[in-house]
C-alpha cells in the first residue's frame, strides 16, 4: 500500500458510488487522496462530509469545479461569479485547499474576449478566495473544448494568465488528457514549476480510436499518452503533490466499480 501514497482518485472516476462508499473503498485499497466533485456533495452536510473523508485518512486534494466565466450576457457573468463564490464556500467547508477552474468559453464571441472575461473573473474572486484560504487552479483544456468549455487551451496560455494575475492564490492544474499533444509541454511545465504555479496533476489516457471525446477516457497505459514521461517532467518541475486519476467513461461507469478500482490501482502502479 505504501506505493499508493501519492495516488488520489476523483469521485467522478467512480461516479456510480456515493461519496461515502467511494471513501470507504478507496481507503480500504490504500488510496491516499480524494478530489471531490460538487455533485457528490448534493444533499449532504459538507463540513461533516469533509470530516468523514478525513476519518478514512484520505487527503482532500481539491474541489471540482468552478469556472465558466465567459458570456455575452453580463447577467450570466455575474451568476458565474456567484457560483464560484459558492464553490469556494463549499471547498472551505469541506477542507479542500483549492477549487479547480474549468474556465469556460462562449461561442458567440471571440476567444480573446472569453480569455479577458476569464482573467477578470478570476481576479475578482481572489479576495474572496484568500479570505476563505482556498486557492484557484486554472485547468487548460484540449482545443476541442474551445467552443464552450474553455478558452484556455494550452499550458502556455495558462502560464501567461497566472503570471499576469501574479497571485499566490492562483495556479494551474496539468491534465495529461488535455495537454499531451503539445510540443511545448515539457518547457511549459518547467516554466509553471519555476513560478510556483504547478498546483495539480491529473492522469488518465487518450484511447485511439476514442468513442466519445468527453466520456471515453482510458486507464493509464490504455492509450497513446506517455504518462510516465509527463510525470517525470512534473516531478522535475518540483511537483510534490498527489497524482489524481480523473476518468470520465461510460464503459467504466457501467462495470463493477470495485473491479474498476482494482484496475485503476494496477494501471497506476504499472503504467504511470
Image: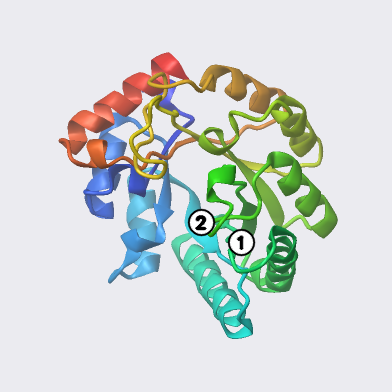
Which residue was labeled with disc 2?
96
Determine which of the numbered discs, if any, sits on residue 134 in the image: 1
Q: Position of residue 36 (x, y in %)?
A: 41, 53
Residue 13 vs 93, above or below: the answer is above
Neighbour tally class for label 1: few under 14, some 14-19, many 20 plus, Cα within 10 Å: many
Neighbour tally class for label 2: few under 14, some 14-19, many 20 plus, Cα within 10 Å: many
The residue sitting at the front extreme is 108
Horizontal side of 56 relative to 137 (left or right) equals left
Decide: marks 1, 2 in contact (CB < 8 A)?
A: yes
Q: Earlier in the sequence, mark 1 or mark 2?
A: 2
Q: Residue at x 33, y 28 (%)?
A: 264
Q: Where is residue 118 in the image (x, y as percent from the top left)?
A: 68, 64
Residue 271 vs 170, above or below: the answer is above
Name the foreground residue: 106 vs 37: 106
Within the image, what quadrant is residue 228 found in? top right
Q: Distance between the residues labelled 1 and 2?
A: 7 Å
**Under tag 2, what secondary structure?**
loop
Name the foreground residue: 143 vs 36: 143
Q: Position of residue 159 (x, y in %)?
A: 76, 45
Amino acid at each position: 500500500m505504501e506505493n499508493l501514497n501519492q495516488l488520489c482518485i476523483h469521485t467522478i472516476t467512480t461516479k456510480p458510488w456515493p461519496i461515502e462508499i467511494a471513501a470507504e473503498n478507496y481507503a480500504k485499497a490504500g488510496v491516499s487522496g480524494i478530489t471531490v466533485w460538487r455533485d457528490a456533495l448534493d444533499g449532504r452536510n459538507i463540513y461533516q462530509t469533509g470530516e468523514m473523508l478525513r476519518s478514512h485518512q484520505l487527503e482532500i486534494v481539491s474541489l471540482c469545479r468552478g469556472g465558466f466565466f465567459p458570456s455575452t450576457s453580463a447577467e450570466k457573468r455575474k451568476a458565474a461569479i456567484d457560483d464560484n463564490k459558492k464553490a469556494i464556500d463549499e471547498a472551505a467547508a469541506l477542507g479542500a485547499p483549492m477549487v479547480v477552474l474549468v474556465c469556460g468559453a462562449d461561442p458567440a464571441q471571440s476567444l480573446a474576449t472569453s480569455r479577458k472575461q476569464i482573467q477578470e473573473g478570476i481576479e475578482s474572486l481572489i479576495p474572496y478566495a484568500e479570505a476563505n484560504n482556498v486557492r484557484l487552479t486554472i485547468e487548460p483544456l484540449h482545443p476541442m473544448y474551445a467552443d464552450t468549455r474553455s478558452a484556455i487551451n494550452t499550458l502556455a496560455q495558462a502560464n501567461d494568465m497566472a503570471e499576469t494575475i501574479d497571485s499566490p492564490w492562483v495556479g494551474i492544474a496539468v491534465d495529461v488528457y488535455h495537454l499531451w499533444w503539445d510540443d511545448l509541454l515539457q518547457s511549459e511545465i518547467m516554466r509553471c514549476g519555476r513560478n510556483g504555479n504547478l498546483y495539480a496533476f491529473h492522469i488518465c489516457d487518450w484511447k485511439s480510436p476514442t468513442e466519445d471525446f468527453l466520456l471515453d477516457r482510458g486507464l493509464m497505459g490504455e492509450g497513446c499518452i506517455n504518462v510516465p514521461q509527463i510525470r517525470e517532467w512534473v516531478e522535475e518541475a518540483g511537483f510534490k503533490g498527489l497524482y489524481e486519476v480523473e476518468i470520465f467513461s461510460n464503459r467504466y461507469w457501467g462495470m463493477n466499480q470495485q473491479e474498476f478500482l482494482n484496475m485503476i490501482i494496477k494501471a497506476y502502479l504499472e503504467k504511470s
